[in-house]
Each structure stands twice: as C-alpha cells, then as structure tokens.
Image (cartoon, grey):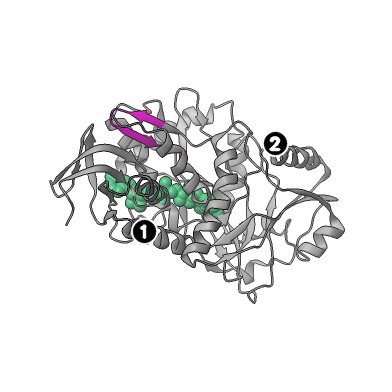
Amino acid sequence: MVPDTADVVVIGAGVVGLALADTWLSRNPNDTVVVIDKESELAQHASGRNSGVLHAGFYYAPDSLKAKLTRDGNRMLKEFCAERGVDVRETGKVVVTTNESQWRSLDQLFERGQANGVTLERIDEQQLKELEPLARTCGKALWSPTTAVADPVAVVTAMAARVGQRGGVLELGQEVVTAQPGSVTLKNGRTIKCGHLINAAGLYSDTVAHWFGVGMDYAMLPFKGLYWYGNWAPGTLKRHVYPVPDPRNPFLGTHVTVTVDGRAKVGPTAIPSMWRQDYGGIGNFSSGELARIARLYPRFFRSKHHNVWGLMRTELPKYSRKKLVSEAQQLVPALNPADFAQRGRPGVRAQLLHVPSGRLEMDFVVEPGDRSTHVINAVSPAWTSSLAVADHVISGIHRD
Ligand SMILES: Cc1cc2nc3c(=O)[nH]c(=O)nc-3n(C[C@H](O)[C@H](O)[C@H](O)COP(=O)(O)OP(=O)(O)OC[C@H]3O[C@@H](n4cnc5c(N)ncnc54)[C@H](O)[C@@H]3O)c2cc1C
C-alpha cells in the first residue's frame, strides 16, 4: 500500500530514479521514500533499452558533470554489480580511425582521457590486432581497458531490489499527472504529500520540470537508437569497437559492441524521433508530441552549434539495416548485413534542446526547484553514471 505521505517521492523508476532512491535511503534509512513509475514493469524505457556499455569517461569536456560522474560511476556500478551478483564482462574498448584526418580528434580524445583521470592507451595497428583481430584502423587507435558491459535490465532489476531492501516503496503502473511543491497527483486521482520531489522521468523530465517552472528554456528532442544482433558464435568479437565521434554532435557514431553474453551487436543509430516513446510502428503515437517536436526542428536546423545536416545525412539512411551494417564495416570489415538480421530492442534518447540557442545540451542537467530537484538531461552515459549522479544530486539537496 502506497503511503499518503512520504519524505521523498521520486518520479521515474529507471536506473537514475532508482539510484537516487537507493542513495537517499543509504543516508537516511528511516525516511519514507516512494518511487513511482507509470509502467507496470521495470526497464521499459532507456534504462532497459541501451547498449549496456559501462563507459570509461574519456569523451567528455574535463569541466563537465559527465567527465567526473562517468569515471566514478563506472567504478561504482562495477562495485554494485559485484555486490549484487550481476555479471559484468570486461571487454575493454578500442576507438579506431578510418583515415588520417581523424588522428587529431583521436589525440584530443586521448588528452581528454588524461584530463579526466581515465586510463587510456595510444595503440598502433599491430597492438590493435592483438586486442581485437576483427577491428581495423588507419595507423592509430585508442585502447580503453576500463570500458565494460553488463545487461541493463539485470542492473535495473538489482537496483530496484536494493531499494526495496533498504525500505523504499516501489509503485509501478501509476502515472503522475501533475505535481507541485509538497505533493504529486496520480492518474487514479490519489495525491501523495511529500517533503521533497525528485524528477527522474527520462523522456518526460522536461514536462515534470515545467510543472515547477524549472528548465523552461528546454524541450525534449528525442533520437531513436536501432540495433541489430549478429549470428556469430559468442566470443567471436572480443572488444567494443567505436569510431572517432564528431565532436559537434552529442552522439558517438555507429559502433559495434559485445553483449554480456558475448554476442556482437551493431548500433545504435541517432535517428530523429517524432514522438517520445517512438519504439516502432505507431505504438505510443502522440499527435501533441509530434506537433511540439515538429515546431522545434526549424530552430535545430538553424543551429550553429551542431553539424545538423551532417547528422541527418548520416543517420536517416540508417533506417536501412544494410546501410547501417555497411557503415560499421569500416570498423569491423568482417561484418556482413546477412549475419546481422536480428532486430534489437530500440531505445529513445531523452535529449534536451536548449530552445533559444538551438543547442543540444551535451552535459547532464540538474536543476533545483521549490521543494524539488530535477534531473533533466540524463542522456548517455547516465546508465553508467547513475550511482555517481545520485551521489552528486543527493549531496546537493538540503532539507528545510
Ligand atoms: C539507444 C540508447 C543507447 C544507450 N547506451 C548507453 C550505454 O551503453 N551506456 C550508458 O551508460 N548509457 C547508455 N544510454 C543512456 C542511458 O540508457 C540513459 O542515460 C539512462 O537509462 C537514463 O535513465 P533514466 O532513469 O533517467 O531514464 P528512463 O530509463 O527512461 O526512466 C524514466 C522513467 O520515468 C518514467 N516516467 C516518465 N514519466 C512519468 C510519469 N509522469 N509518471 C510516472 N513515471 C514516469 C518512465 O516510465 C521511465 O520508466 C543509452 C540510451 C539509449 C536510448
């Protein structure tokens, strides 16, 4: 039975909401903490639909939240998995180049790794061959030994179990339809009073923040990630293989990853989504969301901050599996579209657009509100960073 009053209510039982509840309870074991999710099962959105890659933290600007919280989050999530018996595969990752013009960007990535305190090595073609015989590079590459992989659904399930063991109340299948300082209202008409509200609503985090007058310059511009699994024997590919990303865009480019059980997987794409929970067909279609997102695109297209046309030119054709897999062949020449025909569970990135500037927000955004805290750009790699994000966010909350 959900209590009518709680010290803390968290909206969203994704990995971020659960990590926040877990951390709050570890510091305040006698508090009543309720985590509410509109889905009746866990891991229905990004937290259960991602690559499961435990990122190391070398991509991000050294002064960003992502840099610090990913490096620490990688370690914390591995410790969590060890404690809860969740398998982690220590694959490591190679970042490869396709031509010499990428060497400068590769060097910049290496320098970011150094600045962020992340272990990273410069390697040549011979060393790459020893680490991952199936990958190809143009002269130089990077090796990240701390990048790993786990099953995202297993992590979320284990996190929910720990929240429960700490005394947290998990309320699934209940949509929060509105909230204000001191209370939330559910779709069934019930109201829960709360001392503090934490917004971890993923694709709807901007909507929840706006109820509090927070983050009013931001709007959600979702991007869809499609995946294809290969039929190769488990263990054929040993390491994650990534390209050098375009630093003007917040996405990492099509990559080839290994799942925790050793399967090879190509993706994800970063295709524009026209509604938020756009996982395929017209499921979850919302004409209101379509209209709002369509209105954002002219501003995004005029943005000077990103290579928008380059993004559209490279991403839209990846609706075609053959096109996607063929592009990944530049990283792993043995890939063949015929071998990668099993569709993975698509995910949608909860990417925020700063509307006045037309800029996609690159860093995590945490905004305070009246008796509330809003985590409103929990984009990749917030799954890796979740426990460090929670530590950071909870440390910033001071009760009256
Ligand atoms: C394709 C893809 C690949 C990715 N790959 C990686 C990766 O390899 N490594 C990595 O670290 N990160 C990765 N990420 C990012 C990562 O998945 C997210 O950063 C993370 O899952 C965000 O967690 P969350 O809890 O904020 O969001 P979610 O998992 O989306 O959880 C939000 C929850 O809020 C609930 N909710 C929303 N509105 C309401 C409401 N009104 N009432 C009640 N409940 C509500 C939703 O039902 C949902 O369960 C990837 C993301 C995508 C999309």
Residue shown at 54% from the left, 26% from the top: 302
What segment is highlighted magenta in the picture? Answer: 367-377
Magenta residue check for 368: yes
Q: Nearer the viewer, residue 273 or 359?
A: 359
Q: Secondary structure at mark 1?
A: helix
Mark 1 sits on what residue?
160
Residue shown at 39% from the left, 45% from the top: 202
Looking at numbered disc 2 in the image, what kind of residue is underneath it?
Answer: Ala
Q: Is mark 1 within 8 Å of ligand 1?
A: no
**Residue closest to the far left:** 189
Q: Which mark is residue 115?
A: 2
- Residue 348 is at least partly visible in this image: no
**Which of the two discs, 2 and 1, labels the residue nearer the N terminus?**
2
Q: Nearer the viewer, residue 214 or 165?
A: 165
Asked which quadrant contains residue 156, the reply is bottom left
On screen, residue 395 versus residue 3, left or right, reads right
Within-10-Å neighbours for mark 1: few <14, some 14–19, many 20+ = many
